[in-house]
Image (cartoon, helix red, strand yellow):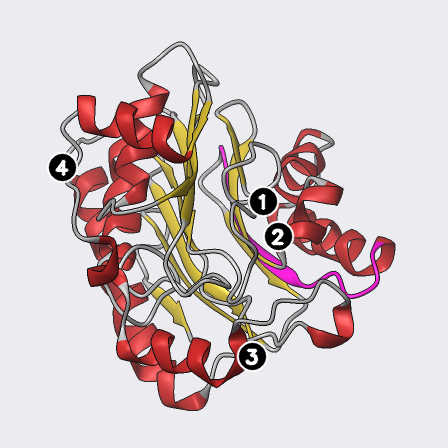
Amino acid sequence: MPLAIAVHGGAGDIPDSLRPDHAAGIQAALRAGKAVLQAGGTALEAATAAVIVLEDLPAFNAGYGSVLNREGFVQMDAGLMDGTSLDVGAVAAVEGIKNPILAAQAVLKTPHILFAKADAEAVAREAGVEFVDNASLITPRRHAQWASGDRDFKVDSGSTDSETIADTVGAVALDGLGNIAAATSTGGMSGKPLGRIGDSPIPGGGFYADSHAGGCSTTGWGETIARVLLARRAIENLERGMDVQAAAEAAVAVLGQRIEGGEGGLILVASSGQIGAAFNSQRMTHAYWNNLDDQEQIIA
């Protein structure tokens, strides 16, 4: 049976100064997920393990290193989907959670799919998810961004600096039983209004998995990604029989064609174990591996 994992660390104008940290981080995340799969773990476990690595690194906009909202503090979103059961778990606008993907995992184990703010935090606490002081999630770089003017979020395409929309993280995994899972986590957009929620916790927008076809995690300007349901669109392309790379490219093409300023990218794993990735931003940090050719690919 094929095994496969793909991870991403965000799409946008990622500064050259951050590329080494992005490359090292994305490789560490890939290897964490790969190790789970090779040990016989599930796709859900592998995707979650990969995202945890990225949430813990300051170079990425998720967990520690999340961007700040207009008021100067962190609010995070995350989503996780089991492609076999089609169960979903997602959290939105949470604070003080070290690894929001684990909060999403806690929601996935309930009959519900999405909790927000204090109610999401309550579900996470009941599940034993680790909490930290919310201020401890702020890195010096993110505080400097906010202090220098990134507190002024605007939704028109001409004023969204692509570095402020970069660094959403995600992973998609295929395990030895044919199960596929997709996970996405983010701090959102720098300077966002209180309570703003983008695509990352929305199934079909920021992530989607169906073990009959494939799994997808997206990154970019959330408002535009959600409007075209980018992740679900990529899976539908697979269901129509498209090659995995063509399916990824066609989905991203729609994002740019249908919405002015639609910017982003995605990683896509097909049930065959083949992997695709596409983006219309300057860069998208991503990495992938499958046991079909047993070669790690790192793009930063």
Disc 4 vs disc 1: which is toward the camera? 1
**Residue pointed to by mark 2:** 222
Direction from residue 195 to residue 223 in the image, left or right? right
Mark 1 Cα-neighbour bin, 10 Å: few <14, some 14–19, many ≥20: many
**Residue displayed at 32% across by 61% down:** 295
Residue 136 falls within the magenta-colored stretch: no
**Residue pointed to by mark 1:** 199
Instruction: Answer above or below: position of 75 versus 157.
Output: above
The range drawn in magenta is 259-271
Task: Please state the horizontal and vertical placement of residue 244, each as a whole percent of the image.
Answer: 60, 46
Do the residues under discs 2 and 1 have CB atoms within 8 angstroms? yes
Residue 263 falls within the magenta-colored stretch: yes
Disc 3 vs disc 4: which is toward the camera? 3
Instruction: Answer above or below: position of 215 versus 179.
Output: below
Q: Could you say which is closer to the camera, residue 229 or residue 243?
A: 229
Q: Marks 3/4: CA distance?
A: 36 Å
Direction from residue 41 to residue 261 in the image, left or right? right
**Residue displayed at 27% across by 72% down:** 139
Do the residues under discs 3 and 1 have CB atoms within 8 angstroms? no
Amino acid type, callout 2: Gly
Hey, which quadrant is residue 17 in on the image? Answer: bottom left
Q: Which mark sits nearer the N-terminus, 3 or 4?
A: 3
Task: Please state the horizontal and vertical placement of residue 183, each as a whole percent of the image.
Answer: 41, 40
Mark 3 Cα-neighbour bin, 10 Å: few <14, some 14–19, many ≥20: some
**Residue displayed at 77% across by 66% down:** 156
Q: Marks 2/3: CA distance?
A: 16 Å
**Residue pointed to by mark 3:** 13
Q: Marks 2/4: CA distance?
A: 34 Å
Secondary structure at badge 2 equals helix
Q: Which mark sits nearer the N-terminus, 2 or 1?
A: 1
Residue at the far top: name it.
Answer: 111
